[in-house]
């Protein structure tokens, strides 16, 4: 079982039914049957999705066997699901009781961290850094668009992928991101925003320098990646929505 059961999915705390089933010692298909049988109740507990698609979100999860579809439950839905399970043992060291405590503490931790982040974002320093970061981001985005055109001129058939690859590379090397966010930067601290801006300036300069020297586009990308990897190694990774908010 992975360390965290609760994760952020589209800016909301969610727990996947596959790990819930594992923690409660249940077969996942039986857990899914519970959700199907009480689907209207689970749906009534939706807040983010009900006005959009009127469904509880699902996703494919990779297991040791073939991929299975799981539901992503919010805190209220997870609590309701737990009430459908009977726990025979009440011993303090019972694995299921320990899992219940873990599940509850993770939901509380994410809620507290998110509340702290909202307070953090009200600080003038954060707002100044965020605004400055948007300017740097726009500049880097413009250079990445130039690089796409440059790569196409050298015969690249999938140049557009470099635009998204560079962004994923940066986030993957610099940050530990558990979950899916609409905009991961909205969940970064002031320090993280400053760090990502520094990394983007490295990308900006690397792409410009490579294009001005008429280097092959793949070599430019490799050089930029190497520079960002070195920066990440020297700086270290940090977790998005992390305990550093408590400092």
Image: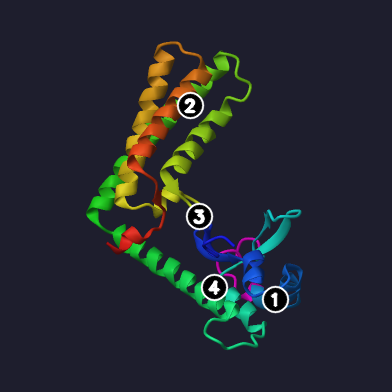
Q: Secondary structure at mark 2?
A: helix
Question: How far separated are the C-alphas under marks 3 and 1?
Answer: 29 Å
Q: Earlier in the sequence, mark 4 or mark 2?
A: 4
Real-space Cα distance between discs 4 and 1? Answer: 16 Å
Q: Earlier in the sequence, mark 2 or mark 1?
A: 1
Work out whether 204 lies above or below 44: above
Count neighbours of disc 4 (C-alpha within 10 A) and say few if under 14, some if 14 to 19, many if 20 or more: many
Q: Nearer the viewer, mark 4 or mark 1?
A: 4
Which residue is painted at 49% across and 59% down in the image?
Answer: 11
Query: Where are the magenta residues, as a range?
Result: 43-53
Q: Is residue 62 above or below residue 201?
A: below
Q: Position of residue 127 (x, y in %)?
A: 28, 51
The answer to whether 54 is drawn above or below residue 132 in the figure is: below
Q: Residue at x 73, y 54 (%)?
A: 67
Residue pointed to by mark 1: 40
Q: Are marks 4 and 2 in contact (CB under 8 Å)?
A: no
Quadrant for residue 38, please give it.
bottom right
User: Which residue, given by chain and number where applicable, does mark 2 sit on?
Assistant: 145
Decide whether the magenta segment is chiefly helix, strand or loop: loop
Would residue 219 be visible to someone looking at this image?
A: yes
Give the class, few, some or many, for how many residues have Cα within 10 Å of label 3's Cα (few <14, many ≥20). some
Can you say which quadrant of the picture contains the C terminus?
bottom left
Determine which residue is flagged by label 3: 178
**Label 4, on which residue?**
75
């Amino acid at each position: 079982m992975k360390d965290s059961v609760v994760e952020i999915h589209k800016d909301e705390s969610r727990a996947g039914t596959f790990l819930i089933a594992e923690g409660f010692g249940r077969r996942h298909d039986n857990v899914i049957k519970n959700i199907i049988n009480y689907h209207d109740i689970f749906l009534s507990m939706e807040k983010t999705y009900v006005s959009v698609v009127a469904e509880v979100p699902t996703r494919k999860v990779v297991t040791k066997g073939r991929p299975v579809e799981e539901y992503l439950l919010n805190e209220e839905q997870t609590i309701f699901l737990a009430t459908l399970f009977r726990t025979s043992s009440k011993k303090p060291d019972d694995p299921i009781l320990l899992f219940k405590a873990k599940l509850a503490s993770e939901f509380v931790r994410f809620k507290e961290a998110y509340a702290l982040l909202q307070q953090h974002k009200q600080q003038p320093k954060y707002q100044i850094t965020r605004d400055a970061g948007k300017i740097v981001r726009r500049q880097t985005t413009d250079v990445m668009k130039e690089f796409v055109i440059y790569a196409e001129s050298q015969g690249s058939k999938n140049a557009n992928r470099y635009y998204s690859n560079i962004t994923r590379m940066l986030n993957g090397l610099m940050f530990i991101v558990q979950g899916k966010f609409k905009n991961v930067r909205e969940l970064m601290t002031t320090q993280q925003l400053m760090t990502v801006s520094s990394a983007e300036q490295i990308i900006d300069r690397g792409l410009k320098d490579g294009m001005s020297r008429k280097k092959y586009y793949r070599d430019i990308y490799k050089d930029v990646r190497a520079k960002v990897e070195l920066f990440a190694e020297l700086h270290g990774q940090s977790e998005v929505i992390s305990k550093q908010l408590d400092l």
